[in-house]
């Protein structure tokens, strides 16, 4: 079975931070870039985040534009993509907006250990263990493929980005860069330390670069597929 086409999306500072060290969430995108992200959301089958993003941002992971939701419905698709959370520990808050009972409920990919302690009931989420002590991303992608997911948008955070990139499971990366550096005020990073296959010997291919106001958007794609991948156009 072919795995979903995986798109990683992030907004960051020039020096690679997703946020600063303050309690208030730092805005790194402008309105035009947020609308671009909404368009990307409308074109995928599922949107995924890690548990840290759920705790920090309390996202809903819905398509915001009424016109785009209507277009999806007219095409026989749900108004918003399937919502996915990666949480090895299973420690998630039922009061998070993501678990509001909206159908279809989100899928939480967790470990066997996490599944045994996860407080979410069936009306909040579908809890799927894909590994005993950790989350096996390949098993999660296989499960999503079995549910008809062909395109998956991964929106963060840094731990999830690192896991997907280091496992060589990213086909496309959308990076929106804000016009400032955070330095010692920086919080979470786009990626952490890992052995990445996207090295100087096998770089990603730049397919788009443009200004969105003061935001610089760069879109990269992979050129070399691993044996696990389908053929990427």
Image: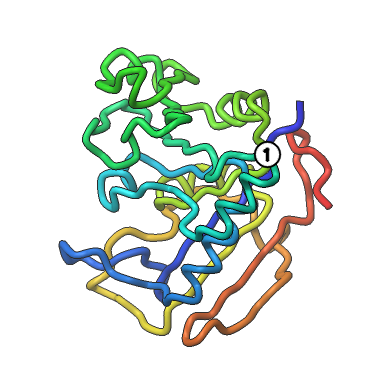
Coloring basis for residues: rainbow
Locate residue 63, reporting x and y percent: 49, 53
Query: Which residue is depicted at the point 45% across and 67% down?
Result: 11
- Is 73 in front, or is 197? 73
From where the camera sits, is residue 151 visible? yes
Query: Which residue is depicted at the point 37% across and 28% down?
Result: 88
Corner quadrant of residue 143? top right
Residue extending farthest to the left is: 23
Q: Secondary structure at mark 1?
A: loop
Residue 152 relative to residue 104: left or right = right
From where the camera sits, is residue 14 visible? no
- Is 58 in front, or is 88? 58
Q: Is residue 180 above or below residue 226?
A: below
Q: How many numbered marks have been drawn onto this rendered protein structure?
A: 1
- Is 87 in front, or is 17? 87
Corner quadrant of residue 106? top left
Residue 23 relative to residue 133: left or right = left
Crowding at mark 1 (Cα within 10 Å: few <14, some 14-19, many 20+): few
Locate residue 226, reporting x and y percent: 75, 40
- Is 153 in front, or is 71? 71
Query: Which residue is depicted at the point 45% across and 49% down?
Result: 62
Q: Where is mark 1, residue-wise?
A: 76
Q: Is residue 181 above or below residue 71?
A: below
């Amino acid at each position: 079975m072919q795995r979903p086409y995986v798109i990683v999306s992030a907004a960051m500072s020039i020096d690679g931070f997703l946020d600063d060290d303050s309690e208030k969430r730092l805005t790194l995108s402008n309105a035009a870039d947020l609308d671009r992200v909404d368009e990307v959301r409308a074109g995928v089958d599922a949107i995924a985040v890690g548990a840290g993003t759920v705790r920090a941002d309390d996202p809903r992971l819905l398509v915001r534009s009424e016109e785009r939701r209507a277009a999806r419905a007219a095409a026989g698709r749900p108004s918003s993509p399937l919502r996915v959370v990666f949480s090895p520990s299973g420690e998630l808050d039922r009061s998070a907006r993501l678990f509001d009972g909206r159908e279809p409920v989100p899928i939480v990919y967790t470990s066997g250990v996490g599944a045994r302690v996860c407080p979410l009931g069936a009306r909040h989420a579908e809890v799927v263990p894909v590994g005993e002590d950790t989350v096996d991303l390949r098993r999660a992608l296989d499960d999503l493929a079995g549910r008809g997911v062909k395109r998956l948008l991964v929106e963060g955070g840094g731990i999830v980005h690192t896991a997907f990139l280091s496992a060589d499971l990213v086909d496309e990366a959308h990076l929106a860069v804000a016009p400032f550096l955070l330095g010692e005020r920086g919080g979470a990073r786009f990626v952490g330390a890992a052995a990445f296959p996207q090295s100087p010997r096998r770089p990603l291919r730049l397919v788009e670069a443009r200004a969105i106001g003061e935001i610089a958007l760069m879109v990269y794609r992979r050129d070399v597929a691993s044996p696990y991948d389908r053929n990427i156009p």
